[in-house]
Structure formats: C-alpha cells, structure tokens
Image (tube, rainbow, N blue to C red):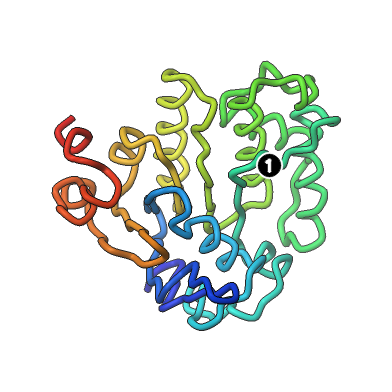
Amino acid sequence: MPLLDVHEVSVQFGGLLAVDGATLTVEAGRVTGLIGPNGAGKTTLFNVITGLQAPSQGRVLLAGSDITRRRPYRRARLGIARTFQRLEAFGSLTARENVLVALEMRRRWATSRYESNALADDLLEQVGIASVAHKRVESLPTGTARLVEVARALATDPKVLLLDEPSSGLDEAETDALGELLHRLTGGGLGVLLVEHDMPLVMDTCASIHVLDFGRVIACGTPNEIQANPSVQRAYLGTAKTAS
C-alpha cells in the first residue's frame, strides 16, 4: 500500500481544467518527483493533497484512509506537511523562532513528549542552517529562508513531506546538501513528494518521477525511463537536457 495515493484527481476553475485525472503515489522511504512545465498544475495538485483546494473529482488517500474531505489542519495532524513555491516563512521571526512556532502547534496533537528548544536546534542542524538560527528570516538569502521552511515542516513530524521547488535560490553546494538531506530523511521512512526544476537534483534523489503537462500525468517511471521518454522530451526536458 502506498503511503500517499492521489487517484484520478481533477480540478476545474470555470472553463479551465487545471488538473485532469491525475494519479500518483508516494511510497514510504522514497523521494517521488513531480515535474513539468510552469502552469502544468503541480502546485494545484499540492493544494489538493494538503486540503487547500477541493478536487472536482478524485480521491486522496493517506495510508489507505480517504482524506479527500479532511480539512488542512486535520491532514497536518495525520502527517502531511509542505513547503511553498512562494516563501511563506515568518520574516520578522528568527529561523529558530519559525521552527518553535511549528513545534508548539504540534503539541496540540502530539502523543510523545519533546523539549522544543532542543528539537528546534536539532532540526536547524539537520537542514544545515544552525549558524543562522538567531537571524531574522527577512534578513536571510532566499535559499536559506527556504531551508527554514523545510525545518519548520519537519517540526510537525510528518509522514509525507511535500516540497515545492526547495532548491530555488540555493547554490550548487547547498543543492547537493539538500539532496543528501532528502536521502537521510527518506532513510528514516519519510515519504517525500518533490516538485523541482533542478533536473540533476531530481534525477539523483528520486526513485520514481511523475511528469505533469497541461494537468495530465503523461509519464511515470524511474529517472532513466523518464529521461528516455519521447513525450517527456517534447513536453519538458528537451533532447539536449536528456543527453547530459
């Protein structure tokens, strides 16, 4: 049984079919990629999974349970966390305070005890930004602020983590470190759904990849299968990129 199962989801805004019968699964302990051109419907699909957007049809299941009609806060308590394409961290708070906010919210449903300050420091260390723990997020480079969002999402102790372009603003070394972090997190059993335009990161970290174009999943497979798929080359990757 997949950890997350998105089954034949469609989203219609008036006459626009933003997502058209999309199906994808996320396995525990693996990074699953979701790629495609801008406007393909990736963020809309994220919004359906997290409960911010109701689907016109289709279902979302978490560990076999139908959560399609669950509210966003219920899904968070069940184990779904996300970051956003547009930075959503609290700019006037420090990196550490951003994580502490999530940890204090988690106390409302957590069954296990934890010490918030120590766990916040540990999470910032995990994502590689312990050195900026006491800096306000609004003063940080965009890439570093995105890692604050990742740490804050992890603070809710998710089963499934949805990452929307987390490498945006990161340099090459920081992107490599992000890839290593994803491998460590999935090694602990976390399921990750990754929306990303950095193809080397996607190909190096994902066990499987779904390709979305005009709201439809046009291909699903391993990184090698996706790179060799003619439909994906035409829609997104291009022949030059697949040769690299």
Q: Is residue 141 above or below residue 224?
A: above
In this rendered view, identify the residue nearer to me: 120 or 16: 16
Does residue 48 appear in the picture of this structure? yes
Q: Is residue 30 visible?
A: no
Residue assigned mark 1: 152
Mark 1 residue type: Arg
Q: Secondary structure at mark 1?
A: helix
Q: Can you give x and y, in whole percent of width and height, for residue 54 in the image?
A: 62, 75
Q: Which residue is pictured at 48% across the width and 81% down the height?
A: 58
The residue shown at (14%, 33%) is 243
Query: Image quadrant of residue 239?
Result: top left
In which quadrant of the rendered view does residue 50 lie?
Answer: bottom right
Where residue 145 appears, as percent x and y from the top left, is 66, 29
**Relative height, residue 43 to residue 155 (above, below):** below
Q: Residues within 10 Å of mark 1 (few under 14, many from 20)?
A: many
If the image is split into quadrants, where does the N terminus sit? bottom left
Identity of the residue furthest to the front in this view: 15
Counting from the top left corner in percent of width and height, residue 179 is at 41, 33
**Residue 169, image x and y in percent?**
54, 26
State the residue at coordinates (71%, 73%): 71
